[in-house]
């Protein structure tokens, strides 16, 4: 029986995850050299999997020249083979592999592998978001450059700032219940969030731009300036805190 799109995304993400773990476990490379080698190896693993199972589809990846056929194609895989190159090179766990399918004008299937935790999150079955524990609202922020928007949300909620690694990891950290809110205003690319956003949406979380407008993928410009991912019950207050909702 042919695999459905979610299974194809999972197979591709797992292939890259295994390649990345094996490369790091060898211990032959470290730091930036390991990260660069990981980017290339994971790209190869994903492209091979998609070529096997979906040979007619277009791939839009951080690690490849932009294939402009995607702008007229109905099926486009949006891929980040190694989201969090620095975290991967440092031996941390908070990095990810992203594989998402855009078709019919929106994200329809995705897998996010967290190789450092030996987990893969899918759009189907979607993650079940744990109930929020008591205490302060938790806001995911960059380890090195927390954005002003995160500080505004933290002030509005008297929240706890939780430093985490890659953008994709911070997004799915909301779905995993590690944090409650992730806001990003410093700019990113579509592949940095496509798969994690698809998983977050499937889990019932709010995902949007800072002004509350929808996130658009497979747009001609790969740049995506900002992002909000949060629990639905917090969405109105989060957006008001950053000026995105009256």
Image (cartoon, grey):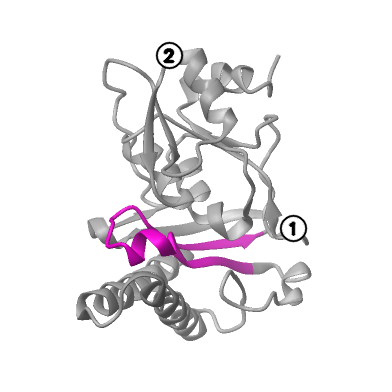
**Res. 97 in view:** no
Q: In front: mark 1 or mark 2?
A: 2
Name which residue lies at 50% across and 81% down: 47
Residue 188 x, y percent position in the rendering: 61, 52
Apparent side of residue 102 relative to residue 203 in the rendered image (left or right)? right
Picture residue at 44% right of the left edge, 52% below the top: 166
**Spatial CA span between label 1 and label 2:** 36 Å
- Crowding at label 2, few (<14), some or many (≥20) Cα neighbours within 10 Å? few
Q: Please report the residue visible at 26 percent of the width from the left and 21 percent of the height from the top.
A: 133
Q: Quadrant of residue 59?
A: bottom right
What residue range appears in magenta? 76-103
Q: Along the horizontal axis of the image, is 201 left or right of 73?
A: left
In the rendered image, residue 88 lying in the magenta stretch gets the answer yes
Judged left or right of residue 119, residue 223 is right
Instruction: Indicate whether residue 90 is drawn in magenta.
Output: yes
Label 1 SS: loop
Between residues 194 and 21, which one lies in front from this camera angle?
A: 21
Q: Residue at x 64, y 41 (%)?
A: 226
User: Would you say residue 131 is visible in this rendering?
Assistant: yes
- Looking at the rendered image, the quarter that the N terminus falls into is bottom left
Q: Which residue is mark 1?
A: 219
Can you identify the residue that label 2 sits on? Answer: 158
Label 1 Cα neighbours within 10 Å, binned few <14 / some 14-19 / many ≥20? few
Tell me the SS state at disc 2.
loop
Sequence-wise first label, 1 or 2: 2
Tell me the quadrant of the picture where the C terminus can be found. top right
Q: In the rendered image of this protein, does residue 189 appear above or below residue 40?
A: above
Residue 13 vs residue 131: left or right? right
Q: Is residue 20 above or below residue 205?
A: below
Q: In the rendered image of this protein, does residue 9 appear above or below residue 49?
A: above
Instruction: Provide residue 195's location: percent of width, then percent of height.
Output: 50, 55
């Amino acid at each position: 029986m042919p695999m459905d799109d979610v299974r194809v995304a999972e197979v591709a993400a797992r292939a890259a995850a295994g390649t990345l773990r094996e490369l790091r476990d060898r211990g032959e490379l470290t730091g930036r050299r390991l990260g660069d080698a990981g980017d290339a190896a994971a790209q190869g693993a994903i492209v091979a999997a998609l070529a096997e199972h979906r040979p007619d589809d277009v791939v839009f990846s951080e690690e490849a020249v932009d294939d402009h056929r995607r702008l007229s194609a109905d099926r486009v895989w949006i891929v980040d083979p190694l989201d969090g190159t620095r975290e991967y090179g440092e031996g941390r766990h908070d990095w990810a592999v992203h594989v998402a399918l855009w078709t019919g004008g929106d994200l329809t299937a995705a897998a996010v592998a967290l190789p450092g935790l030996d987990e893969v999150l899918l759009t189907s079955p979607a993650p079940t978001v744990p109930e929020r524990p008591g205490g302060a609202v938790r806001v995911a922020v960059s380890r090195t450059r927390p954005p002003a928007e995160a500080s505004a949300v933290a002030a509005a909620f008297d929240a706890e700032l939780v430093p985490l690694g890659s953008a994709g990891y911070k997004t799915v950290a909301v779905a995993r219940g590690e944090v409650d809110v992730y806001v990003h205003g410093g700019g990113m690319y579509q592949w940095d969030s496509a798969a994690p956003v698809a998983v977050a949406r499937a889990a019932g979380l709010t995902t949007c731009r800072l002004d509350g407008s929808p996130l658009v993928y497979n747009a001609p410009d790969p740049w995506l300036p900002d992002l909000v991912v949060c629990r639905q019950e917090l969405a109105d207050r989060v957006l008001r805190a950053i000026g995105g909702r009256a």
